[in-house]
Image (cartoon, rainbow, N blue to C red):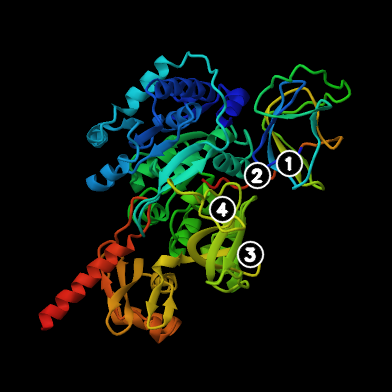
Amino acid sequence: MLLDMAADGFGDRIVIGHKDEGLSARRLRELAVGGAHLARASEADAILYLAVNGPALPVALFAAARAAVPLVPVNYRLGEEQLDALLANHPRALGIADAEHAGALRRAGLPVRTPAEWLAQAAENAGLAADDEPAQPDAPAALIYTSGTTSAPKGVVLRHRNLVSYVLGTVEFAAADPEEAALVSVPPYHIAAVSNVLTNLYAGRRALTLEQFTPDGWLGLVRRERITNAMVVPTMLARIMDTDGLDRSVPTLRTLAYGGARMPVRVIEAALGAWPHVDFVNAYGLTETSSTITVLGPEEHRRALASDDPVVRARLGSAGLPVPGIELEVRDPFGEVVAPGETGQIWVRGEQVSGEYAGGGPVVDERGFFHTRDQGHVDADGYLHIEGRADDTIIRGAENIAPAEIEDVLLGHPDVLDAVVVGVPDEEWGQRIEAVVVLREGVTVDADALRAQVRGTLRGSRTPERIECWPELPRTPTGKLVRRDVVEALTAEGREAVGRQG
Amino acid sequence: MRPRVGQMLASTVDTTAVIVVRCPDEDLEITCGGAAMAEGNGPGPAAGGTPDPGLMGGALLGKRYADEDLGVELLCTKPGPGTLAVNGVPLPVKTAKPLPASD
C-alpha cells in the first residue's frame, strides 16, 4: 500500500540510491512485483536477507509484502553457531546473501542469491502484471531478531498494521523536497534500517546506504551526495566528533537523527556546537515498537543547550515526548503509575507496538501495554528520561542501583570518552560496583580521582570499588554495550587476582 | 459501521480508498460521494454505484481528512472525485504538522 501510494503519487522520483542511476518509485514497484514472483515460484515462506544494506533490501522488503511472506533480515556478524540456530527457524526461506555469508545459507540447505542476482532476477520478472492482493494488515511484514545483548536473540514479529501505523502516525506523504536525500548507516537487521526504507519512501526522500561506517567515509559521502537527512547511532557520532584531523563540514545536512543507545551529553553538545545549522532529533524506540516511540526535536535540543534552568538543560539527555498514537506509562514494580520525577519501568501502548515474539502471542498486559524493560522517569512536562535496561540494574546489598546514573558522572569527566558500570558477583554484597572507562588518547587519569568524583556527586554506596581503563568497550556495531562481556572479563580478572594472592 | 484504526475502506462509487488513522469507539457513517464506504483496499464488487453530484469535492492521495470533534482521521491511499464525509458532514483536509524526521 505504501509503495503503491509512492509509485502513484511520485512515480518518476528517484527514491533509492544515486541521483543519476537510482531506482524511481515506479521502478521499485516493478522490481517488488518481480521479486514477489520469485518468492511465490519457489514457495518461500520468508525472504531471508543476510547481506549489507543496499538497494536489494527495499526490493526484498516490498517483494516480501507482495508475496505475503515476512522479510527476515539477519545479522551477518553473528557467530556460526548462533547463525545456524537462527537459520534453522526458516527452512523454506528464499535466501539473499553476500558471497562471504552465502556459506551459512548453504549449510542450512537454502537456495542463495547474491544481492546483485536478486535484483537482476527481480528485473527479469518486473514486467509481470501486479495482480496480487494488497498485503493483509494482520500478516507479518518483518521478523527482526533482537540484538541479544541481554538474552538470546528473539524474533520480533512486526505486522503490516504495526509498520503502517508507525509510518502514517509519524510521516507526511510526499512531504520531502525533491533534492532531499537521506543516508542510512545502520545495518539491515536493525529496525531503523527497515523503518527508514518505509519512512523515506513515503516522504518521497531519496535514500542511500553506507555499507561500512567510518567517520571520514560517512563525512565524505554526506558531502559528495549532498545528504540532507541522516541517521546514526551514538557511537558513530562520537567517532565523528572525537577523531582528530577530520574535515567535519557538512553544508547540505539539515537533520541528524540518532538513537539505538544512550547518547553521551558530551558528544551531543560537541555536535550541536560543530553543526549549529543542523536539526538534531533523538529518537527512542525498540524493535518491538516498530522503531521510534518518543522524539526530542531540534528546537528542544537548542533550548536545552541554551538554558540555565537545570530541568530544561537536562532534556538534552532525554528521549523527548511520545509520538502521536503512543501512550506511555512509567510504573513501579507493582504496576502502579508513578509520579513525574520518580523512576520506574516504561510501558507503552499503540497501534505500532507489536510486543510479539515468533512462536508466541503479543506480550502485553490486559490493557494492551507492552513492557519495554527500560527504566526511566518523565519530568513535569512529560519528557522521558531513560535510565537503562531494567535487567542491567545492579543490586548491591539491598540497594538497587542504575548503572546509567554512575556512567553519567564518569562521562562528565572531560577525558573520559566512554564508560560502563556493572555489577560483579561478590560474596559479601551479592554484587559489587565496578567500572571500565575509555580515556582520551595519551591521557592518564587517576582512578581514585574518578572515584572521588562519583562519591562527590552521588554517594559512597554508588562509588565503584574498582575503575579500570580499557582501549575500548565491547559494543555491537549498532552501538549497544555488551555488558555481560564486561562482567565476564572483570569477574575473570578478580579470580586471577585472588589466585595470585593465594 | 464501527471503524477500527488501521482498517482500509473503499468507495462504492469511485476509485477512492482510505485507511482509518484515528477513530472513536462508536458507530460512524463513513461515506464517499454520498455512498457508504466498504471494507477493502480497492473498488469492491459493489462499486459502480452513482455518486451524489453535490458531493464531488474529491480526495487527494496522501492527504488526511479529519474531524477533530469526532476524533476521526482518514488518510487517502487512492484518490478519487468523491467527497469524504462522516455522519453526513464532509471532512476537511487536515493541515499537516509534520514531526521532525526521526529515522
Task: Identify the secondary structure beneath mark 2.
Answer: loop
Which disc number belongs to residue A293?
Answer: 4
Cα distance between the residues tagged 1 and 2: 15 Å
**Front: mark 1 or 2:** 1
Mark 3 Cα within 10 Å, few/some/many (few <14, many 20+)?
A: some
Residue depicted at 45% across the width and 65% down the height: A388
A422, above or below B11, in the image: below
Q: State if disc 1 and disc 3 touch (CB < 8 Å).
A: no
A329, above or below A173, in the image: below
Cα distance between the residues tagged 4 and 1: 20 Å
Q: Position of residue B99 (x, y in %)?
A: 62, 47
Does residue A98 appear in this view? yes
Q: Position of residue A281 (x, y in %)?
A: 54, 52
Does residue A181 appear in this view? no
- Chain of the residue under the numbered disc 3 shown in the image: A
A81, above or below A401, in the image: above
Q: Which residue is mark 1?
A: B73
Residue nearest the observer in this picture, A100 or B32: B32
Residue depicted at 42% across the width and 23% down the height: A40
For residue A106, which quarter of the picture? top left
Mark 2 Cα within 10 Å, few/some/many (few <14, many 20+)?
A: few
Task: Identify the secondary structure beneath mark 3.
Answer: loop
Q: Amino acid at mark 1?
A: Glu
**Same chain letter for marks 1 and 2:** yes
Cα distance between the residues tagged 2 and 4: 15 Å
- Chain of the residue under the numbered disc 2 shown in the image: B
- Chain of the residue under the numbered disc 1 shown in the image: B
> Which numbered disc, 1 or 2, marks the residue that appears first in the sequence?
1
User: In the picture provided, is A471 more to the left or to the right than A304?
Assistant: left
Q: Which residue is mark 3?
A: A382
